[in-house]
Image (cartoon, coloured by chain):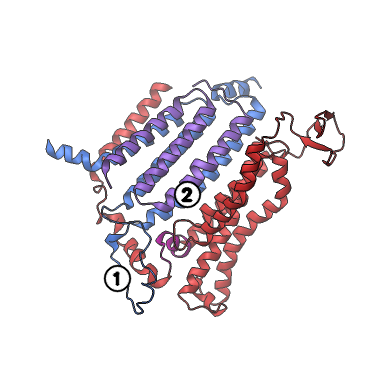
Chain colours: A purple, B red, C blue
């Protein structure tokens, strides 16, 4: 496995994590968190953990984003930090 | 608070970073984690269980006791969401829309919930017109998603997949129905009572297979004992036992995902969703 | 000096995982919004899962699904010889696969709790909730 791809995806993961916790809108957090999960899934597929990547793609990037959006829909998008 | 947090994070991170020098090199095949037991799993799995996908064979056979309680944890999570959020108080207002003219009627207070008919349909408080494209695409797509989920469960022995993934995909097909139509349509297809029963049934299938093995004279979850009642040789019967267990996991996960979604999306009232 | 660079080249993954974990910890400690804290918890969890998966990785090994498991059809007798170094260690994958599904279940419970808190206090900010509690 070329280590360059691994490094690029890891940097993207860290960027997604930082923006997800620093953006001031919870709906944006939801979408960024979905992107974070999908990047993570890519990283696992690179490492050869196909089952884990499949689970993360369906669970982390799919269903948990929907839960997140549903919860934000029923509460509020506003956040102070 | 911010600076204290940064300090704690910096100290923890520093300690962990200094510990990395003791780790084995990345991708080193003789690292302590990759010797001992896991080599046995890799080399003997196909002889002992006849399942090519090592992850499935370790998940559902060698470490099936672990997976059983993980399933129980998921069941408990569904139960907790139900108990926290479920709200049996009926809403105050019901809206009905006359389909051909678009006139909206509002029934207030303890008026009986009228069933929707051909002329009137019940609708949400913030109703938007049905989008024909979204509805048609989802109606075509949902059966394929469900078939794919069944394939993932059934083919988990030979390719990536298994009960957890298949269950989540099957549950997400119902969530897609609830998003593209509305929550009431989805809840008419799969009732709340059935969801509760299914999530318990999934765990029960898992435990039941274990107990059947006990009654046949083996240990708990020792699938090779199932050869006494199934006409298959003792190695391939372990693959069948794994399939049964995966089906149980899939049913439980599917039901729990739908329960969690429905309760969060409607705040437990089961009337209006996203 | 070259030893130092070789050390970085072989260990940089671990360093980035630890940075990711610390981002999650920072969000859990400092952020005021409950949902942000939940996101921090999830980032922490996925960083640990990532670390476990990377422990099982072997260079020049393939995914843990055995090739030609049931023999080449038609050749008849066939003895399969499997070398452990050719396949990635499946044990961390199994442990983490269940951890991911349990993490989404706990995520659902955490969101249900925050929805309940919002119904009661009309806010998700931690300091405002504490203020409402003190008023009573």
Residue on which disc 2 sits? A55
Q: Which residues are magenta?
A: B51-62
Mark 2 lies on a secondary structure that is helix
> Callout 1: 10 Å neighbours few (<14), some, many (20+)?
few
Query: Is B145 left or right of C89, judged from the image as shown?
Result: right
Residue at left offset 84%, top offset 38%: B119
Query: Is B37 left or right of A70, judged from the image as shown?
Result: left
Counting from the top left corner in percent of width and height, residue B209 is at 57, 67
Query: Is B36 left or right of B143, judged from the image as shown?
Result: left
- Give whichever of A77, C102 is nearer the camera: A77
Q: Using the rendered image of the protein, determine whether residue B260 is visible from the camera's viewpoint.
A: no
In whole angstroms, how far apart are the C-alphas of marks 2 and 1?
Answer: 30 Å
Counting from the top left corner in percent of width and height, residue B187 is at 71, 45
Report which quarter residue B1 is drawn in. Answer: top left
> Callout 2: 10 Å neighbours few (<14), some, many (20+)?
many
Chain on which label 1 sits: C
Counting from the top left corner in percent of width and height, residue C136 is at 66, 22
Same subunit, labels 2 and 1: the answer reads: no
Report which quarter residue A38 is drawn in. Answer: top left
- Give whichever of B186, A33 is nearer the camera: B186
Mark 1 lies on a secondary structure that is loop
| Residue B152 forms part of the magenta stretch | no
Residue at left offset 81%, top offset 28%: B104
Residue at left offset 29%, top offset 33%: B14
Most extreme residue toward the left is C1
Name the disc covering residue C81, or none: 1
Q: Is residue B192 above or below residue B87?
A: below
Residue at left offset 51%, top offset 76%: B225
| Residue B59 forms part of the magenta stretch | yes
Q: Using the rendered image of the protein, determine whether residue B239 is visible from the camera's viewpoint.
A: yes
Counting from the top left corner in percent of width and height, residue C92 is at 38, 53
- CB under 8 Å between discs 2 and 1: no
């Amino acid at each position: 496995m070329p280590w360059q791809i691994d490094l690029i995806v890891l940097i993207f993961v860290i960027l997604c994590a930082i923006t997800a916790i620093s953006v001031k809108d919870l709906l944006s957090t939801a979408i960024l968190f979905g992107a974070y999960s999908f990047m993570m899934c890519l990283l696992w597929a690179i490492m050869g953990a196909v089952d884990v990547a499949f689970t993360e793609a369906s669970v982390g990037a799919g269903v948990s984003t929907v839960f997140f959006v549903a919860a934000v829909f029923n509460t509020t998008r506003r956040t102070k930090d | 608070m911010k600076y204290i947090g940064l300090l704690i994070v910096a100290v923890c991170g520093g300690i962990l970073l200094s510990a990395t020098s003791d780790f084995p090199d990345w991708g080193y095949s003789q690292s302590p984690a990759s010797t001992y037991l896991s080599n046995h799993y890799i080399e003997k799995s196909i002889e002992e269980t006849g399942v090519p996908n090592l992850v499935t064979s370790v998940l559902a056979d060698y470490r099936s006791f672990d997976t059983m309680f993980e399933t129980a944890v998921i069941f408990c999570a569904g139960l907790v969401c139900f108990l926290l959020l479920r709200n049996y108080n009926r809403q105050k207002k019901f809206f009905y829309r006359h389909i051909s003219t678009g006139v909206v009627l509002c029934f207030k207070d303890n008026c009986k919930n009228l069933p929707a008919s051909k002329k009137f349909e019940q609708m949400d408080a913030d109703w938007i017109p049905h989008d024909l494209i979204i509805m048609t695409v989802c109606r075509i797509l949902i059966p394929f998603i469900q078939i794919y989920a069944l394939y993932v469960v059934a083919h988990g022995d030979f390719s990536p997949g298994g009960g957890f993934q298949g269950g989540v995909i099957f549950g997400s097909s119902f969530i897609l129905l609830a998003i593209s139509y509305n929550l009431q349509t989805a809840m008419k297809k799969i009732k709340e009572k059935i969801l509760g029963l299914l999530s318990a049934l999934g765990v029960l299938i898992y435990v039941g297979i274990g107990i059947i093995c006990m009654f046949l004279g083996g240990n708990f979850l020792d699938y090779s004992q199932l050869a006494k009642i199934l006409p298959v040789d003792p190695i391939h019967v372990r693959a069948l036992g794994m399939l049964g267990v995966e089906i149980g996991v899939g049913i439980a996960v599917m039901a729990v995902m739908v329960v969690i979604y429905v309760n969060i999306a409607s705040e437990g009232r089961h009337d209006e969703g996203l | 000096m070259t030893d130092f660079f070789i050390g970085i080249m072989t260990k940089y993954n671990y360093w980035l995982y630890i940075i990711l974990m610390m981002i999650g910890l920072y969000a859990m400690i400092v952020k005021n919004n409950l949902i942000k804290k939940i996101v921090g918890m999830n980032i922490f969890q996925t960083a640990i899962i990532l670390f476990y998966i990377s422990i099982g990785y072997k260079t020049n090994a393939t995914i843990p699904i055995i090739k030609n498991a049931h023999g080449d059809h038609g050749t008849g007798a066939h003895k399969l010889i499997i070398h452990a170094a050719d396949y990635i260690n499946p044990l961390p994958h199994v442990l983490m696969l269940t951890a991911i599904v349990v993490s989404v279940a706990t995520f659902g419970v955490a969101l249900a709790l925050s929805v309940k808190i919002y119904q009661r206090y009309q806010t998700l900010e931690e300091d405002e909730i504490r203020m409402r509690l003190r008023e009573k």
